[in-house]
Amino acid sequence: MSDYANIGIMLAVAAVIAGSIIGVSFLFGPRNPNPKKGQPYECGIEEIAPMPSRVSIRFLQVAMLFLIFDVEAVAFYPLATILRETAELDAQLGTSNALFLLAEFGTFFALLVVGYLYVWKKGAFRWNS
């Protein structure tokens, strides 16, 4: 129980520190809004043409899907390493834990493929729709 108490105390102290920092900046921070401050700033270059009002959601959607599938694909290397080490240990001990890990690895890969096919079928990768 003391392990959980330590975590609770740490979270409470973090919340108090974060709250106090936000409170102090709210109380003592400068408040002088200016229309110039609301404009986009790009490396000191003056704005030549107005920015387009909307950005296509397709770009953001494809970027998020890339990140999701990329992070999932990065998990393959540690899983393969663990599977190899478990297979070597199974050979020494005469157990069959590697088959269970291989089944989990296959399930993970199958879910990833199903998700990819679902997104593809929904047309998330088409730029012109």
Image: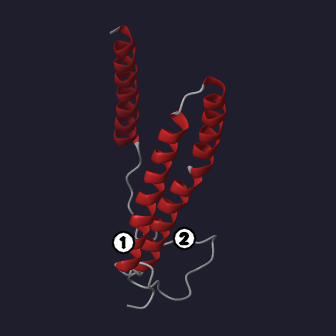
What count of labels does the image hold?
Answer: 2
Name the image quarter holding residue 3.
Answer: top left
Q: Which mark is drawn over residue 20? A: none
Viewer-proximal residue among 93 and 11: 93
Q: Residue at x 34, y 19 (%)?
A: 8
Residue 78 lies, with reference to residue 17, above or below; the image says below
Residue at the disc numbered 1: 118
Q: Position of residue 107 (x, y in %)?
A: 43, 52
Number of other residues with Cα within 10 Å of mark 1, as a class: few under 14, some 14 to 19, many 20 or more: few
- The quadrant the C terminus occupies is bottom left
> Mark 1: which secondary structure?
helix
CB atoms at circles 1 and 2 under 8 Å apart? no
The single residue placed furthest to the top in the displayed view is 2
Q: Residue at x 34, y 39 (%)?
A: 27
Horizontal side of residue 70 vs 24, given as left or right: right
Residue 48 lies, with reference to residue 73, above or below; the image says below
- The quadrant the N terminus occupies is top left
Residue at the disc numbered 2: 41
Q: Residue at x 40, y 27 (%)?
A: 14
Q: Residue at x 63, y 77 (%)?
A: 45
Residue 92 lies, with reference to residue 79, above or below; the image says above
Viewer-proximal residue among 106 and 39: 106
Q: Is residue 16 visible?
A: yes
> Mark 2: which secondary structure?
loop
Viewer-proximal residue among 51 and 56: 56
The single residue placed furthest to the bottom in the displayed view is 128
Q: Position of residue 86 (x, y in %)?
A: 60, 34
Amino acid carrying label 1: it is Tyr
Horizontal side of residue 1 vs 97, given as left or right: left
